[in-house]
Amino acid sequence: MSDKNSETTLPFKYQWSFVEWMTSLDARTPAESELRDVVTAESLYRLETYQSSFLSRISSNLSETLFEACENLFGVEVVAKVLAGFFKFHPPTAESITDAPAQLPEHLRATAHTKEALLFADVADVCMRRWRILTAADPHAVSPTEDTPLEAVHLMSPSDYIAPSGQHDLAAAWESGAEKPFEYLPDSLFGDSAGLLLVKTSPTDLTFVRVPIQLNEFVRALVAGLSIEQAVDALEQSASADAENCLALLTEFMAKMQIQRLLTQRSS
Amino acid sequence: MNSQRFTWGVGLRPGHYSDWQTQEHVPALEIMTDNLIHHRGGPALWHTKRIVERASLCVLHGVGINIGGLSPLSTKYLDGLKHLIQVFKPRVVSDHLCFTQARGIQSYELLPLMRTKNTIEHAVARIDSIQQALGVRFSIENVSAYVNYREDAIPEGEFVSEIAQRSGCGILLDVNNVYVSSMNFNLNPEDEIKRFDLNAVTQIHVAGHSRRDDFLFDTHDSVVCAEVWELLRKTLSSFHFSEHGTLPIILENDERNTSLTTLLDELMKGSQVCNEDTSIVQPPHNSGESHV
């Protein structure tokens, strides 16, 4: 039974009208007229229930999953309004509601005229990166022990990067690794750092780690696909005059990433 | 009433993960398929695995398979569901008898089907494909409806039952949905329940609803009303068990501020209304409000 043929038969031909009308978020579409022809007169006034339920279900789901940070920053009503504006132009096609706003940051950057909207785009982008990492496959070795070979520890491979835009001499790695600079995220988020690494440190935790700006080379190695262990090797072997200083910073940095144990292993 | 005939439980919700970790007895749990199906790791899977392994049984319940729609069944969705079945070994795997999308656009809603012979043919074929893909018996749930169609030709209970009979699938009988739809269309809910083939029922749902203007809306955000508990009690008394084993009865509540204690208290109350053994649904010791 092909879609096209079935859409011409009575039990099915209303289905597209129903979905089109719901997702258009506009009661005055031709689709609504078609629905009026198939729904009984007595229950017609309840059609709107489905349309309002569509938006509230999406908003509620995204509030619990992706956009908690957006709601904290902008408020529930603003988030709902932004989503309504977005879905009116981009009806959802993703099976998962959490994938439905994937194009929201791009949409806002292309259409928004206020700094607040552009900040929303950046925050939403970070929220979605966070969710994508959090729900990705868990690290193989969650709690490395003294006996765990370094090559078996994938846990500490950073999962994503958030690079500030403009205020630092960023490693080229940011340019190649980040899809878009985060122009409107406040400097306070980054401080005196090259950016943030997002690291899944356990099946239930995701950590944002600030990267000292002196470690741009190190980060470049990570973005090029090296594991943290390999990037440390590369730094140790480099002839850079700053290598010693960098290694000291790296020790501090990696301690924050809870991999002091690995450094201890290396030196023993 | 023989208490072994039914296994009482609740829907597993993210807001209750930490409370379940300290709960001594874990009753039957319903896992929302769509909360996990797109995850490859992370907190939801991690917590669910650890909680469900202590549950008396679990069932998988989805909203996104699109049984009555025209778009091809999603291989990705079916593969994901098959994986979840392997991981959790659920007693029942179900979704709603409705359509949720058209031409690739998702509504994320449970939209009512036009109840005709052609729709039955279509649903039976789709359920055959689903059962073949999953390798298990599937179950279909009756949905709450707010509108009906001029061309509706078959009462809902008979519509669902014929699809179940012809496809060999089971029925997830949502007693609250029967009540809501009956009230919305001036029908007698007890008569409507009798239209369902109870021999095909593999699971039961009960939930709260709310009133909007002059009709009822299936919100899952409030306590179950006395009328629905009474409808459940009468329904349960109609079951004649031979080879069913225990039948899961799941209380659904999607209100994120409802604590686990409140939920289990309500489940216990409901099971008492139905004259059932409540030992498995004792509230947790020292459990406070939900840690949402």
Image (tube, coloured by chain):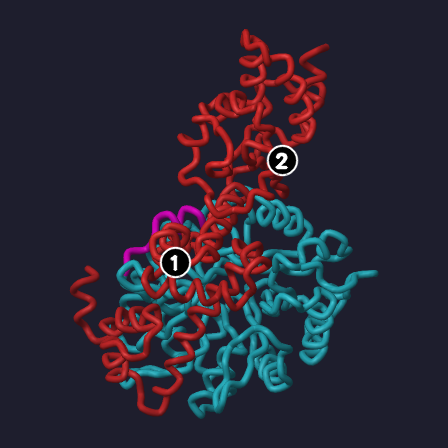
Pick out the residue farthest to the front: A167
The answer to which of B120 and B77 lies nearer the viewer is: B77
Q: Which residues are magenta?
A: B71-81
The answer to which image quadrant residue B228 occupies is: bottom right
* Residue of label 1: A113
* Helix, strand or loop for the magenta stretch, by majority: helix
Percent position of residue B7, x then y:
64, 65
Q: Which residue lies under the disc numbered 2? A: A201
Judging by colour alone, the chain drawn in cyan in this rendered image is: B
Placement of A229 over or under A85, stated as above or below: above
The colour applied to the residues of chain A in this rendering is: red
| Residue sitting at x 56%, y 37% | A198
- The quadrant of the image that shows the N terminus of chain A is bottom left
**Marked residue chain, label 1:** A
Q: Nearer the viewer, residue A188 or B198?
A: A188
Q: Residue at x 52, y 41 (%)?
A: A133
Chain under numbered label 2: A
